[in-house]
Every structure is written in structure tokens, then in C-alpha cells.
Image (tube, rainbow, N blue to C red):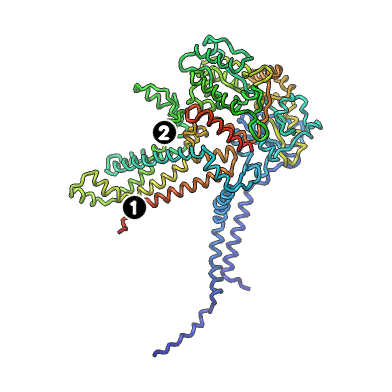
Amino acid sequence: MRVPMARRSLLRSASALVVLGTLGGCGAGGSDGDSAGSIRYEFWGSPSRAKKVGTVVGLFQKARPGVQVQTRASDYNSYIENLTVRAAGGALPCALGVQSTFFAEYAEAGLLRPVDDLTGSGRIDVSGIPENVLASGRLDGAQYVIPTGSFVRILGYNADLVASSGAPAPADDMTWDDYATFLREVQRGLPAGVHASEIEGNNMFSLTSWVVGHGEAMFDGGRLGFPKSLLADWFRYWLRLTADGVTVPPSDLPTQTASLELTPLALGKAAIGTRDIPHLYITEQALAAKARGKTVAWVPMPRVAPARSGNVLGINGISIAANCGDVAATAAFVDFFTNDVNAALAFQSDNGIVTNLRAQEALLNDPRVPKGVKRSVTVWRALAGAGNLATTVYPAGLATLTNELTRLYESAAFGRMSVDEAVDTFYATAQYALA
Amino acid sequence: MVLTTARPPDASIPRTRPAARRRTAWRENISGYVFLSPWLLGFVTIVAGPILVSLYLSFTRYSVLRSPKWTGLDNYRRMLTQDPTFWSALEVTLTYLVLSVPVVQVFALFLASMLNRGVRGSTVYRAIFYLPSLIGGSVAIAILWRYLFEGDGLLNNALGAIGISTQQSWIGSPDTALGTLIVLNVWQFGASMIIYLAGLRQVPAELYESAAIDGAGAFRRFRSITLPLLSPVIFFNVLMNVVTAFQAFNTAYIVSNGTGGPADSTLFYTLYLYQRGFVDFDMGYASALGWGLLVLVAASAAGLFALSRRLVFYGDQR
């Protein structure tokens, strides 16, 4: 039977589309999900870190020939964005790098697998990790993160600049009032254009030190755990120092969030600022490159009472996705990354100070490990040994609050908002963000 | 009375009923629709679909990691009554628009008028003036702009060279930060200038000659001949610049490191929307902000069109 012309035309058109669609579909990659014996590990970091992770993966695959680990790295901001989008699509990798500042978002959404059964059975050995470090990866009593690196906020200061001001070196048991007095003393001896301190009023982690140092909790369930008056005092503390010329001017605030080498402390424009432990060495190198100083020394964060540490501990670590297709292989990889000494020597504390105490010992004793890495481990051990570390669990919504604190402090610093207005707005935002 | 008889139907032409004719027309059209379908599919899945989904999400609380939760008008209520940052971002955007758009038009028209006089080397000048429009919106220029206006940036160095010593950080002060972005936008006047130049070339020279004979001076000729005849072009440029100003994002993001600071002085509406959507992952609220922007742009365009009925002269009007 002869097919009518219109129908032939339709058939030809449809056939063309099917062919095109098939050809287009052939170009698409297959599924990149994890399957038995093959897992993905995604993390943030520079190409240098990616290379170190590659070395660790190579060591793991040699030890466990049946398991293939594919890795993928991106910069920090892109990483979180990608992770969130992939989480929404159910495409999280089995092993994902997380931080204590944001893992709660994923854990509360049921996207991360609690690993208590794995740590309890010894499939992931956490005996070498201090309890307070482990606690930073716990939420509502369940362990979601195996910490592989830790970071602590402390005070880093340009020892040469402080010495040239005529002020004595800061004590390691200062209260916040002592700290203000110390800053004023340093400022008196500094040349024009150089200030004693960077501004910390807009920094969420410095605020955390202030709050926990006063014996309060940052968060309490779905709301802030400290009174408004404490936040108002924090704002006023830094605004007064700025008004007295002790800190860099508010117009320098953008430079404080730029790369480490461009901050006022690294450029020799400020004598002291808060830093994570590994950043001390980077800042020191930046100062030396500009001949603005040779040594960046450190002291613990100020505190209100000796029993209350203001040095807040955070962790970087690895979590296992709730929909991971090969938990056994992933657990083996996490265990290797966390405990294997050769892996630690290859990774060299590239993402926070290594948490495993045996690995720390190995790093300190190996002559090939750079000086800066050894110094970070030593500083961490000094704080841990003195029991001078505080733990805080950050809930979902921290990113919103961090940006809001910066925005509100800047508004208050430039006189566009009163301190009370800024505090009220912060609490209103927290009520929404933490709900 | 004339009897008319219907002509018998031509036997060679097949008789078809209306329904059959419709089916035939449909079959003939279907080939076109089939070849159109890839574009239609793309439009529905990439454009129309997400637009409708964002409308739905604007009535929900949606954090990407969990399912959307219907909250009705809460997002819009929060936007209009509980979010001071929304009003701050709107104010910054409108200030940017109100200050930069007229300046761009005046600058562009002035230079187009100069170039229209047939000065020597006008082709070279045209290219030079147009160049910033090509590169001005780029990330590289935004980064350069930041270095230009920092406390120890090129501008202060240049001022120091002529005896004006200042360490003022132009992008670090909320009083001047927005001004640097306005200057950057004005710097990109070239695209408007080219369009004005084309419009000026369409104005008949005889009109100017007649006016000159009648004793009209340069300003009078500009006001009574150039402006009315150029009004459609002015309207087009203003409309396009207004829409572009509402959508400004790159420069504010780069210059302020994504914060919209200092003190929200460079927090454009689109940057605030980006922060809410892609930093806080508050997609429901960001969607509401997006629809708010649509309403703003539509209202602005409608206002301009309404104004054009009085101020724009089209040659075919009586």
C-alpha cells in the first residue's frame, strides 16, 4: 500500500529526530556513580593539594588493589556550590571532604551517613584522634565526619614590629581587657600609617572565641545561644579601638578577606591579627618577602577566665554519603587516609593539622617534612597539651550568619547603623537562618 | 429575475469536507513542528520550565538540600516588610541607575555630535570610544578597577603626581564605592554613542540649513531639530541602559569581593539575589527576589513606554 505524502514526510522527520537524538545521546558519558570496587572522593583545594591526595590514593590502591578511587578537586567556594547541587540531584560522591562549619547542612538533610557503626567496629580506627577533635564532627550524638585535619584560631603577631614599638611581647594568658591595653601600648610606639591590630569585629570565628571565652554557647538548638548584650559588647569593643586609631581603618576591611598575602598583617600594616595555625607560616613568608618582618609569633586567644578557652577548634574531614554504593571500600579509604603514616607523610597536613597523634609524631620526626608543617603541629600540640581548646558545633545557616555579621559590623563601623540596630538585625536574621 | 444555477463542481477536484481539510492542514504542519521540536524542547526545559518552577519556588522555603515547603506569601512578605537589606539593595540599584544612565546618554550624545561633524580621524576616535564597551563588563576590567581605586592604587598615585596627596580608598569607603562603579558604567558609553551616531546621520541636512537661514543658532537647532528627530533613538538607548543597569552584577561582585560592601554600598539587587540563592542557598527567597526584579524591570519599561507617547517623535505621527 502506498503511504500518503504527508505521512511519508512525517515519518522522515521523526526518523531524522530519532537519529539525531541517538547520536547526541551517544556523546553523553555513562553514569559516574560509585559502584562496588570503585569510589569517588571529592574535596577542595589547590592543584598542589590535589597532587598530594593523588599520592595518598596511589598508596591506598597499592595496599587495596581491588579498590579504585577517583578524585576530583575544586576551589572552596565552587566546591560547596557543586556539592549542594549534586546533593540535590542525589549524585554525591561516596567520600566527600567536609568542614565543621558546613557539614551540619548536609547531615540534617539526611545526606550523610552516620559512621558510628564503622568506628565502633574498628573498620575506621579513630583511636589515634583526640576526643575533642572527634567531637567536632558529631551532630546530635551521631558521628558524621572523620576528622583528618584541624584548625584553631589564635593570635598571630609580627614579633619584630611589636618589639620595635617598645611594647613587651603579649602574654599567653591575656583577658580581653588585657588585650585592649596591650594593643594601645603597641600603637603608641608604631609609625604613622601602621596600626596595632586588624579589625576582628566582623569575623565570625573571632566572635566565637569571644562568646565561648565568656562561657556562653554560640548556638542552642535553632537559635543563638548567647545574649544580645554580649554581641553588642563585642561590636563596641572593636569600634572603640578603631575610633582610638588602634586598628586599621574600616576602609581596609576588604583587604582582610583577601588572600593571606594581602592582609594588613602580611603587608606590615598591622602588628597583630587572628589566624589559623598553618597561616602563621604563610604570613611570615609574605612579611619576609616584603622585608617587613621575619617572625610571626603567636599567643592563644584572650579569655575571660583561665578555665574557659577562647581557642576554637574546627576540623576538616571526610564524610560518607548516605547513598554510597560501596561503604566497605569507602570506610577502608577513610581509615587509610586518617591512620596510615605514609599517607600522612605524603599529605603533610595540607588541609589543617593532621588529627592522628601517631601521624603528628611521624611528621615531627621526618626530616623531609617542611619547617612550616612541623611548626603548625608543634603549636597545635602546645594548645592541646595545655587543654586550651574549645569545641563548637556549627549548625546549618552559618554561612548566612557569617555574611550578615560582616555586613552589619561594616554598617556600624561606617556609622550607617547603630550598634543596637545591628545587633537586633543580626538576631532577626539568625532566627530565620537557624530555623 | 435572473435565474442562476450553481455551476456543477469540477469532477477533477476531489471534494473534501471541512474536518478532512483540517486534518490535511494539520498533517502538513506537523513536519514543521517536528523540526521545531528541538528548539521547543529547549525552550520548555531550559527557559519556560525553570521560569515556572521559580514562580512556584518563590512561594516555598527551599534550601536545595531538602524538598520545597509551601509557605505561601511569606517570602514576599519578608522581602517587603522584614528585610532591610532588600530595600538597601534596591536603593543602591536605583541610585546607580538614576545617576549613570543619564550621564551615559549625555556623554554618548555629545561625542556622537562631535564625531558627526566629520572631524579628521573620526573613524579612529569612533573605534577608541567604542572599545570600553567591548571590554568594560569583563572580569579583568573589574579587577583592574579595584586596583585603580584602592588606597595605594593608580588613581591616588596619579593624584599624588599632580600634588594632591591622598590615601583615600575609593572602593573602601561606602561614600565613594558606588561612584567608582558608576564611573565604570559611564566609561562604557561607546555602544550608545555608535547608535546615536547612526541616528544623527539620518537627520536631513536640509532641515539644519533651513533653520540656519531662518536665524536659528546651534542650540536652537539642536533642541528643535536634532532632539525631536533623535528621540526614538534616545528612547531606545535609555530603555536598553535601564534594563542593563537593573541587571548589573559583574563589576559589583568583583570590586566588592562578592560582599556588596563596604556597608552594602555596592550591594546591587542582582548581587543580593545571588547571595541569597547561591551563598545562603535560600532558593525560595531568591526566587521571590527574582520575580520582584521582573516586576521592577517591567514597571520601568512600562513607565518609559508611557512617557515615550509624549516625548518621542515618530515621523509618521500626525
The amino acid at mark 2 is Gly
Count of picture labels: 2
Most foreground residue, A120 or A247:
A247
- Determine contact: label 2, label 1, CB under 8 Å: no
Tell me the residue at 68%/34% (across/down): A221
| Mark with earlier residue (2, 1) | 2
Is residue B137 placed above or below B213 in the rendered structure? Answer: above
Most foreground residue, A133 or A172:
A172
Residue at image mark 2:
B179
Instruction: Measure how far apart labels 2 and 1 are at the Cα level.
Output: 32 Å
Q: Nearer the viewer, mark 2 or mark 1?
A: 1
User: Would you say residue B149 is visible in this rendering?
Assistant: yes
Chain at numbered mark 2: B
Residue at image mark 1:
B310
Chain at numbered mark 1: B
Please state the horizontal and vertical placement of residue B211, each as a whole percent of the image.
Answer: 21, 49
Most foreground residue, A337 or B80:
B80
Please state the horizontal and vertical placement of residue A60, each as a whole percent of the image.
Answer: 74, 31
Crowd around label 2: few <14 · some 14–19 · many ≥20 (10 Å):
some
Horizontal arrangement in the rendering, residue B203 relative to residue A257 (left or right): left
Tell me the residue at 53%/25% (across/down): A256
Is residue B282 placed above or below B14 in the rendered structure? Answer: above
Q: Secondary structure at mark 2?
A: helix
The amino acid at mark 1 is Arg
Q: Quadrant of the N terminus of chain A?
A: bottom right
Please state the horizontal and vertical placement of residue B304, each as a whole percent of the image.
Answer: 39, 49
